[in-house]
Amino acid sequence: MIYIFGIEEILNKNVIIICIDGGRLDWAKKSSIFKKFSGNSVFFSQSITYAPYTNSAIHALISGSYGNRNGCYSYWHSSRFKGQNFKTLVDYLHEKDYYTCADLISDLVLPRKNFDSYEVYDESDINLELRHTNLLESMKEKNNNGKKFFLYLHHSGIHTGIRDQVLKVFDNFSPEYFKNKPENIQRYDGLFRKAETYLEKIHEKIKDLDLFENSIILIISDHGISVGEKIGERAYGSYCYDYTIKTFANYNSSELLSQEFTKQVSHVDFIPTILDHLEINEDETYEKMDGISLLNAMKGKTFEERYVFSETANPLNDNAPPKKPNTKSIRTPEWKLIYNEYNNTKELYNLKNDPNEETNLIDEKISIKEELWNKLDDILQFRTKDDENIPLSKRGLVSP
């Protein structure tokens, strides 16, 4: 497979990131919308988020680093993101004289640093199709005036619907929610269809403005949503099961060939990929990113899958989640270990044979359990110094 394209063409590309908040992978795989983007795009069907809730997931995405290192590792820690140590995509593009713009649901989602325009909308009363197509038109004007742009668009429709129809009605253990899975599926399906309509309008506008040829476009979900799979999680953020941490990503650029990429990747890989694509070197004066570039893999070259780490803060019976993660997972393409720190239990699943994570093999696959446990311990040794979390091996928690 040979790719021939000009260096100048690559270096002049805009960057557009569109986050579909709460978008489930299984719905995305059935959707026809990505076929419209498929001419020059790579659809990642094994993309794993760092956290099954928005602020930590997007901070990990934009910095290419896990929250256990960058400081944003819980619902409460957006303000503790270590921007002085971790350089974001916005920082890199700002240095390259990009116009940087974000339109989002909350100022907890992204750090404001180096944005030229940073707007927060009221999710309860907003026409995102009109708002975001208008923003694309204004970004096109930047191009017409000789300015490249970075645009982050946050679609909150699924999130808002789940907030109003689920979070305000049920708790994480409501029998009436978990006994009505068909109704939950129907509710989510309706919300996802509205997100599809939004993406159709965005696609039309990008096409009309002729932005496909000179833009890298990443459409990604931050996390999935429960439809009643596991009691104790009516929406997201409680567990590290795949219905919330396995997400979709669609990477579009004019010189790529359409394909589905089925190997396991992490959200933290996409910013290194964009930087590599734009031939921007990682700044060695900052902390090294956890992610790696997927550019060569998208061009058909050999790709070695890596361990992927996720964590969350299970609220248990409380209304608010704790300030520290208490549920962690480490995975290979075949196996996933979950450690529930709040009750010191472990779960091990064969993801190939048991994708719904129903059969816990923790007492049967000892060597696999120990391999993953040791890797999880290695990752947690790099948690930021002013946080209370310490490696598992130093908590008196030996391999079970």
Image: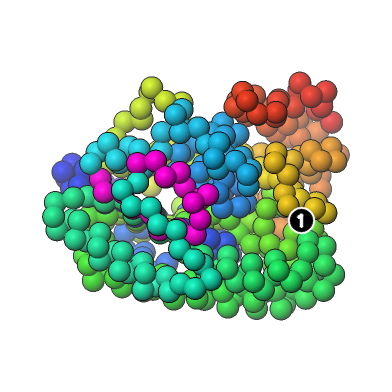
**Residue drawn at x 38%, y 23% as measured from the top left:** 284
Q: Is residue 35 above or below residue 374?
A: below
Residue found at x 45% / y 39%: 63
Q: Is 346 placed left or right of 252 in the picture?
A: right
* Residue highlighted by disc 1: 319
Which image quadrant is residue 67 in? top right
Q: Secondary structure at mark 1?
A: loop
Q: Residue furthest left?
A: 145
307 to the left or right of 326:
left
Lateral position of residue 344 relative to residue 66, left or right = right
* Residue sitting nearer the eye, 234 or 253: 234
Q: Is residue 99 magenta?
A: yes
Comparing 274 with 201, the one in front is 201
Number of dots carrying numbers? 1
* Vertical position of residue 231 compared to residue 339: above or below: below
Considering depth in this image, is 318 or 7 the residue closer to the camera? 318
Residue located at (26% from left, 49% from top): 99
**Range of the magenta residues?**
98-114
400 to 212, vertically: above or below = above
What amino acid type is highlighted by mark number 1? Asn
- Residue 305 shows in this picture: no
Residue 2 appears at what percent x and percent y? 26, 46
Quadrant of the rendering where the C terminus is positioned = top right
Verify whether residue 390 appears in magenta.
no
x%, y% of residue 356? 72, 58
Residue 52 placed where, x, y %? 62, 51
